[in-house]
Amino acid sequence: MPFQFKLNLDHELRRLFGDLPIFVPSSVLGELANTLDKNGKAALALARNYQIVETEFRGDDAVIEIALQRSAAVVTNDRELIQRLKERRVPVVRLRSERYLVADDY
């Protein structure tokens, strides 16, 4: 998302929440390392700037589990993941108008 739309993720998150810790599930690093997406390496480098949280879960399950454990919001535009997060009342931060982030509170 940050590279596709030239979004400064850190700036946008600070604008919404102020200074706060940002968590990345450890399994996401593996997914990014193995992706064929043209922005995969840049996304991996960005993810390594944040606090890595070890988890035995994979994919969306890892994201949901860590959000629940840490009472954290999740940054995503993935519709399926958003639906699963809504069902668990996890706040979602998503991209609007390809320029800025907005927080939905459930």
Image (cartoon, rainbow, N blue to C red):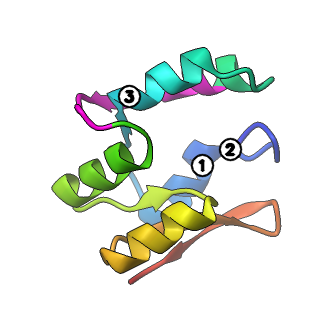
* The C terminus sits in image quarter: bottom left
Say what amino acid the circle numbered 3 marks.
Ser
* Disc 2/disc 3 C-alpha distance (Å): 23 Å
Give the SS element for disc 3. Answer: helix
Residue 67 lies, in percent from the top left, at 29, 55
10 Å crowding of disc 3: few (<14), some (14-19), many (20+)? some
Residue 75 lies, in percent from the top left, at 52, 56
Residue 45 higher or lower than 16, as above or below: above
* Disc 1/disc 2 C-alpha distance (Å): 5 Å
The residue pinned by badge 2 equals 8
In the image, the segment drawn in magenta is 43-57
Residue 48 in view in this figure = no
Q: Earlier in the sequence, mark 2 or mark 3?
A: 2
Residue 5 lies, in percent from the top left, at 82, 47
- Residue at 42% x, 69% y is 84
The residue pinned by badge 1 equals 11
Give the SS element for disc 1. Answer: helix
Q: Which of marks 1 and 3 is nearer the N terminus?
A: 1
Give the SS element for disc 2. Answer: loop
The residue pinned by badge 3 equals 27
Asked whether the beta carbons under mark 1 and mark 2 sit within 8 Å of each other, the answer is: yes
Say what amino acid the circle numbered 2 marks.
Asn
Residue 50 lies, in percent from the top left, at 40, 31
Total label count? 3
- Residue at 74% x, 47% y is 7
Residue 52 lies in the magenta-colored region:
yes
Say what amino acid the circle numbered 1 marks.
His
